[in-house]
Amino acid sequence: MNVEVAKFAQSSGSDSVTVDELNLVLDHHSFVPFYAQIVDHVRTLVTKNKLREGQVFCSEGDLARVLGISKMPVRQAFQKLRSEGLLVIAKGKRPVIGSGRVPWNFQQLRGFSEEMRRRGLVPSAQLLSLHLQEPELEVAQALKLRPGEQVYSVRRLRFVNTEPVAVVTSFLPARIFSGIEKQDLEKRSLYEIFERTYNRKVQWAEEVIGAITANPDDAKVLEAEQGNPLLLIKETTYDAQNIPIEYSISLLRGDRYTASVISIRQA
């Protein structure tokens, strides 16, 4: 088997990767692309705590040179690791091992599936429940419902790379989304259904971000420990006519997600 082994030495301080902490093997006979082999190896080292958050990692050029390959697959690997929160990359600085938490930028309105695919991850969903019901006051106010109007309650477990990361409960006005129970809510995103099936162009959303601890039910579904921190997001989504079409409550595992918000001071 034709393989190459990449070893590189950095300073021996505990805040940097040493020669003993990275032993990367590329298999030239494998059908797995070089970038994917690099990603899998680094991900495994982080999972096993052989690479720790805050440690300085090698540059693209260093890794490409030692492996004897071009920078392109290394750059692809770094982008993938960054999308998973495993590498923190700042301009002009060497990469640093991250926490594995995925930063969620709330200034970009994207559905869960769209955002994950943009990061090179594989999203999926499991439908936990779907009911037609009377809305609670919080839901009715958010969706500006009239007395007597009902909502669909759609509760789904969201996965990234087959790992459960979030429970999302969406409340949808029944007068707008009649028959939505006939849609494939596991394979299609809600935004896609809104826009392609119901001709409701998603325009903007308002989010309220908080934090809670996982109760026994949440912990069981998310395969987390009871009491672990969860990122709480309450979001109201509006269409192009400024009509609220969805109110959702999302619980995201705190060990996988952080909130990313950019603030600009006005003159």
Image: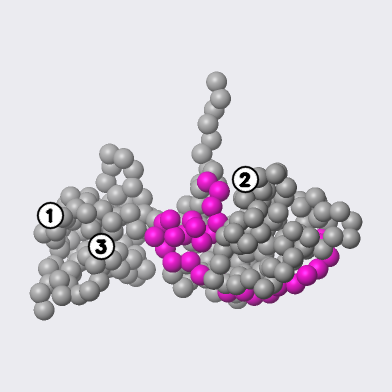
Image-quadrant location for residue 199: bottom right
Which dot, 2 or 3, sits closer to the camera?
Answer: 2
Q: Find the distance from the CA under tag 1 to the CA under tag 2.
A: 45 Å
Does the stretch in magenta take in 121?
A: yes
Q: Which residue is mark 2?
A: 204
Left or right: where 80 falls relative to 59: right
In this orientation, does residue 12 appear? no
Labels 1 and 3: the sequence-earlier one:
3
Callout 2: SS:
strand
Task: Locate residue 181, reporting x and y percent.
Answer: 69, 72
Residue 65, numbered label: 1
Pointers 2 and 3 in contact (CB under 8 A)? no
Pointers 1 and 3 in contact (CB under 8 A)? no
Query: Which residues lie in the magenta part?
Result: 108-136
Residue 35, numbered label: 3
Quarter holding the C terminus is top right
Q: Eyeballing the image, is 53 above or below 266?
A: below
In percent of the image, x 64 and y 75: which residue is there?
128
In percent of the image, x 47 and y 52: which residue is there?
103
Task: Locate residue 37, reporting x and y percent.
Answer: 25, 68
Quarter holding the N terminus is bottom left
Q: Find the distance from the CA under tag 2 to the CA under tag 3.
A: 36 Å
Labels 1 and 2: the sequence-earlier one:
1
Which dot, 1 or 2, sits closer to the camera?
Answer: 2
In percent of the image, x 89 and y 60: which residue is there?
148
Task: Locate residue 53, reporting x and y percent.
Answer: 37, 56
Q: Nearer the viewer, residue 119 or 39?
A: 119
